[in-house]
Amino acid sequence: MLNKRVDALSRALSVVKSGDTILVGGFGDIGVPLQLVHALAELDVRDLTLVSNNAGTGEIGLSRLFKNRQVSRVIASFPTQAGADHFKAAYERGEVQVELVPQGTLAERLRAGGSGVAAFFTPTAYGTELANGKEVRMIDGRGYVYERAIVGDVALVKARLADRYGNLRYRLASRNFNPLMAMAARHTIAEVTQIVDAGVIDPDDVHTPGVFVDQVVECGA
Amino acid sequence: MLNKRVDALSRALSVVKSGDTILVGGFGDIGVPLQLVHALAELDVRDLTLVSNNAGTGEIGLSRLFKNRQVSRVIASFPTQAGADHFKAAYERGEVQVELVPQGTLAERLRAGGSGVAAFFTPTAYGTELANGKEVRMIDGRGYVYERAIVGDVALVKARLADRYGNLRYRLASRNFNPLMAMAARHTIAEVTQIVDAGVIDPDDVHTPGVFVDQVVECGA
Amino acid sequence: MSKGWSDADLAARVAETIPNGACVNLGIGLPTTIVRYVPAGREIIFHSENGIIGMGPDPVPGKEDPDVVNAGKKPVTLIAGAAIVHQADSFSLIRSGRLDYSVLGGLQVSEQGDLANWKVPGTKGVGGVGGAMDLVAGARNVFVMMRHTDKNGAPKLLKRCTFPLTGVACVTTVFTDYGVFDCQNGRFIVRELAPGISVEDVERATEASLDFGQARKVARS
Amino acid sequence: MSKGWSDADLAARVAETIPNGACVNLGIGLPTTIVRYVPAGREIIFHSENGIIGMGPDPVPGKEDPDVVNAGKKPVTLIAGAAIVHQADSFSLIRSGRLDYSVLGGLQVSEQGDLANWKVPGTKGVGGVGGAMDLVAGARNVFVMMRHTDKNGAPKLLKRCTFPLTGVACVTTVFTDYGVFDCQNGRFIVRELAPGISVEDVERATEASLDFGQARKVARS
């Protein structure tokens, strides 16, 4: 019987290697898989490329990866939010390269990565410095910027419910980037509040189909 | 109070003009908004471009638009399914131009149209006659085909539930192309089995947010 | 300092401009307060980039839901009839023109309608862009809400922006403590002056080309 | 005519090849029958392009649900733990490599792994491509299931396809009534011969380059 449940965070995270690109769900601290991220901060993996909308605040979440000097590159739309002191310190130490991406472009690049679409043309950032050096194209009289898909090695996502197939359901605005991260990685680990029996989540109510999820860890709320 | 409910099919369809591009949900006959399509077949509008996966079977659904000679162009992945006799007759009379598009490319072009993405590169159809005359590009050693977004004038979709905001919920595999058609048109009309009070559809359970829907007609099952 | 509009006046003035049924995105900071000033009898659909369609009033203290926050990560509420989508669908909505209005803060606006609001040159650090570039690229109407001058009294309505751009030729209307300014054909048309603000006040505090039209009469009467 | 595999044998032979836990798409026609032959104790996730992940066995007659159909629009069932997605998400799954296997019918397969299965040149009408081009572009393994020769006895394993292609260099393995043929390095490696089929039978009915390897020994013993 198929069962994607894994009992230990550390066992789930054993797939992560130094140099990997790690996709992490969440918007600010909402919907961030904190326990997976904290367990990752305990591992001896470094030189990570981190793809996430933000870069942690205070002492929790993604902040720990910067504090531990595990990250060498960040792809984000807003890494500098108030409280992102560990990210800012790592940036000022020159440890971290940053690729700043408009939020909608970040979301769309991840969706493209999870959709087998290699690249697309978006109107966002046309004429701004975030389009510098990028291919642009006029389409029907409007300027568009060429953007490439993002594919990660491992995605860490947070959901409310899962079943043994890895079907996920998120809660309200903690959904945010989580479904996109799950799609865009070669290997996806979900931290969930509760694992339920197969069939409890109605087929019409699944937010992320299990085919995009490799491992599920039940962590409580 | 906002209320997208419209009582008469014909009143909802009064936005359709000759020459329009009409997007119609459904896969085969499943999830096709039959009552809207049949009401459209009663109207004096012609020279329509029809975007739908198929082109009707037997005497119902999209078949009526071909029988009535209302369609001059079809964008579809499989218009020639068994029973598509009215489409085939119209094609043989030379009345209908057909743009044949792989099904995933059709879905993605519609999603792009509903996402403000002008174009994208897909691996599908690379090296085949359906890529003839299209721009191709090698990306990371693989061949991709340049595909443009589709935006329609009016979408006709079928859902199970709606509320006054136009939030929609589909039933099982009748979802298919409906959410994409709803996104990709300037004006979207939904034929629904039942209209429920606002709030009955949980925010986590909405399949198509009302912001993509302009009018809702309650038609029963 | 009783000249011109207070922040609350300004929020109320913007709210008054937005018609019934509009779909509106409120940027971080001052714009988020607009939700408090919707005139009675008017229903506005408030969108938040993190995937909420249908934000309601501020939560009752103590009743905040940690999974229901706005773009500024502040607790908000959902209306009955709200819908949640993931970040890619949220930005599909933005880029495809479903937002009737986007209201953002501004650092500089040029008479060509260029907006700069995400980065001050010469400040330390990488900066953060968030969803602003997508919002100005996608919304049908872009409203900028800001003080008329910077903290040193220097004009923010300029012939050309000197700060990095958020978008090119994207601003519809600027609302400041001095008045309401439509951006059209390379100049600002003064639609309204705030109480106690004279034509001379505006001319003195503005570098961009101004067209007073009927506002001049109103102000001098 | 007792030589070689019957259609049922062939479906069972393909089913036997697919490992536990695989995600598999079954094309229209013969491939859809594979669902009946999954060996006991093995769990396979069957995907249908119209948005079903987790198809179950054939429905009990009289208990068909009109909203639960496969790619051929035939009634199917859902397993407990199935998920429904819209057509764009369904093809995201296909193109992004989440399908371990795609099983399709074939008209011709070349020794380079090209597949032709959607159009016979010279036939009347526009043809229909459906999702075949996406499936062969996206799936990790592409299995073709077909008769070894056409109805006139002409070979279908060719040096080069003469019919319009579905995909280039995409086929992993061909299953025919004559045996199992892996497509590798510009030739077909004969993995297995069906009962009663000799090496000479295969040579006579095949135009493409063949490599019998160990199968020759098996067949002659």
Image: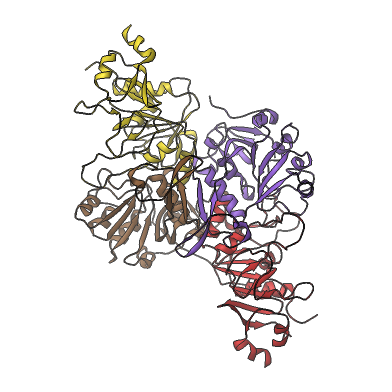
Chain colours: A purple, B brown, C red, D yellow
Which quarter of the figure has residue C16?
bottom right
Q: In this view, does C22 lie above or below A161?
A: below
Which quarter of the figure has residue B40?
bottom left
Q: Is residue A6 left or right of residue D214?
A: right
Nearer-the-camera pick, C76 or C126 = C126
Q: Is residue A53 left or right of residue B110?
A: right
Nearer-the-camera pick, C20 or B23 = B23
Quarter of the rendering occupied by the C terminus of chain C? bottom right
Task: Residue C107 in the image: state x and y as whole percent.
Answer: 70, 68
As drawn, which residue projects farthest toward the bottom?
A: C221
Q: Is residue B132 above or below residue A164?
A: below
Nearer-the-camera pick, B188 or B152 = B152
Task: Residue A18 in the image: state x and y as whole percent.
Answer: 68, 33
Q: Residue at x 63, y 72 (%)?
A: C15
Quarter of the rendering occupied by the N terminus of chain C? bottom right
Nearer-the-camera pick, A206 or D123 = D123
As drawn, which residue projects farthest toward the top?
A: D221
Task: Residue B46 in the image: state x and y as whole percent.
Answer: 28, 64
Which quarter of the figure has residue B216?
bottom left
Total marks shown come to 0
Task: Residue B122 in the image: state x and y as whole percent.
Answer: 45, 45
Is residue C85 shown to the viewer in this render? no
Is residue A114 shown to the viewer in this render? yes
